Image (cartoon, helix red, strand yellow):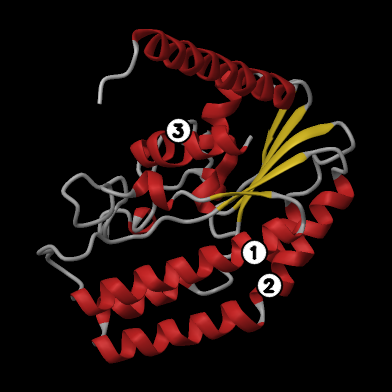
């Protein structure tokens, strides 16, 4: 069926208007977020472990200039930027040591937390070194914790953030799936890889539910990491790094800029 030329022109004009308005809204949103202070909280996925270029003063927290909070702040010049995310942080660590910069003038907050509480590092160690059945058993223990205990811990963090920064837009960032399935990959079995991915999905679902319950925005990075998982041939994640074990299963610089930053840009 051929469309009359006036209708085609009208369609093109409407598409151009929508595109322009969307771009203007995105720019305005970023400008509003940058008008106040930005505070970046969370664990190693927010501090930038694995991305290199660590800030000397951050010590063992390993805050990277390649991490998505630093990249966003560099691009948007918020009135202030406090980067307190720290490698290894759990929900209790965020509550005890990261919330100091929050105040009524804070306009934007980002946070990723929950993976360490659920025992992610031990899950990966178990699955790398032991059998399929032992790996799945450890994952099931983590899933039970995610269901029974983690929601309350996340609620405590989110409630404290809102109490200290009542005017802030809060973006909660999740975690990527780690493996591309259905392809040959040296290392973990397909059974282990699928179980790990399913556990990551479960963790993200719980974090997303609790974030939305507090009126926060959940930034789901699984879509941006699709095609860049381990075993994909174009991974944005470190596999086991025996020369620097702390990098293992963390985003590379490309994962921060290509996987996390676009999602945070949209969430912010």
User: Which residue bears the numbered disc 3?
Assistant: 66
Q: Residues within 10 Å of mark 2 (few under 14, many from 20)?
A: some
**Image location of residue 16, percent across then percent down:** 48, 13
Mark 2: secondary structure: helix
User: Which residue bears the numbered disc 2?
Assistant: 151
Callout in the foreground (3, 1): 1
Q: Is residue 111 left or right of residue 13?
A: right
- Along the line of sight, which residue is nearer the eye, 12 or 147? 12
Give residue 191's quadrant in the image: bottom left
Residue 155 seen from this side: yes
CB under 8 Å between callouts 1 and 2?
A: yes
- Of marks 2 and 3, which one's residue comes earlier in the chain? 3
User: Which residue bears the numbered disc 1?
Assistant: 209
Give residue 26's quadrant in the image: top right
Q: Is residue 100 left or right of residue 192?
A: right
Give residue 242's quadrant in the image: bottom left
């Amino acid at each position: 069926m051929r469309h009359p030329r006036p209708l085609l022109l009208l369609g093109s004009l409407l598409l151009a208007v929508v595109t322009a308005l969307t771009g203007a809204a995105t720019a305005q949103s970023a400008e509003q977020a940058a008008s106040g202070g930005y505070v970046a909280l969370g664990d190693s996925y927010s501090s930038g472990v694995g991305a290199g270029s660590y800030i000397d003063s951050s010590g063992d927290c390993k805050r990277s200039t390649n991490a998505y909070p630093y990249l966003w702040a560099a691009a948007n010049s918020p009135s202030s930027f406090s980067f307190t995310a720290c490698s290894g942080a759990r929900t209790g660590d965020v509550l005890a040591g990261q919330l100091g910069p929050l105040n009524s003038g804070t306009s934007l907050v980002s946070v990723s937390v929950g993976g360490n509480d659920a025992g992610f590092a031990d899950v990966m160690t178990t699955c790398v070194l032991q059998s399929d059945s032992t790996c799945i058993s450890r994952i099931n223990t983590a899933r039970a914790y995610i269901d029974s205990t983690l929601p309350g811990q996340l609620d405590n963090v989110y409630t404290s953030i809102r109490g200290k920064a009542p005017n802030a837009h809060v973006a909660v960032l999740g975690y990527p799936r780690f493996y591309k399935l259905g392809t040959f990959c040296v290392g973990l079995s397909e059974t282990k890889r699928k179980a790990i991915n399913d556990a990551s999905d479960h963790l993200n679902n719980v974090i997303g539910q609790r974030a939305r319950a507090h009126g926060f925005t959940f930034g789901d990075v699984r879509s941006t990491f699709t095609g860049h998982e381990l075993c994909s041939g174009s991974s944005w994640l470190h596999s086991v790094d025996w020369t620097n074990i702390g990098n293992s299963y963390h985003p590379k610089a490309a994962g921060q800029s290509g996987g996390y930053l676009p999602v945070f840009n949209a969430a912010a």
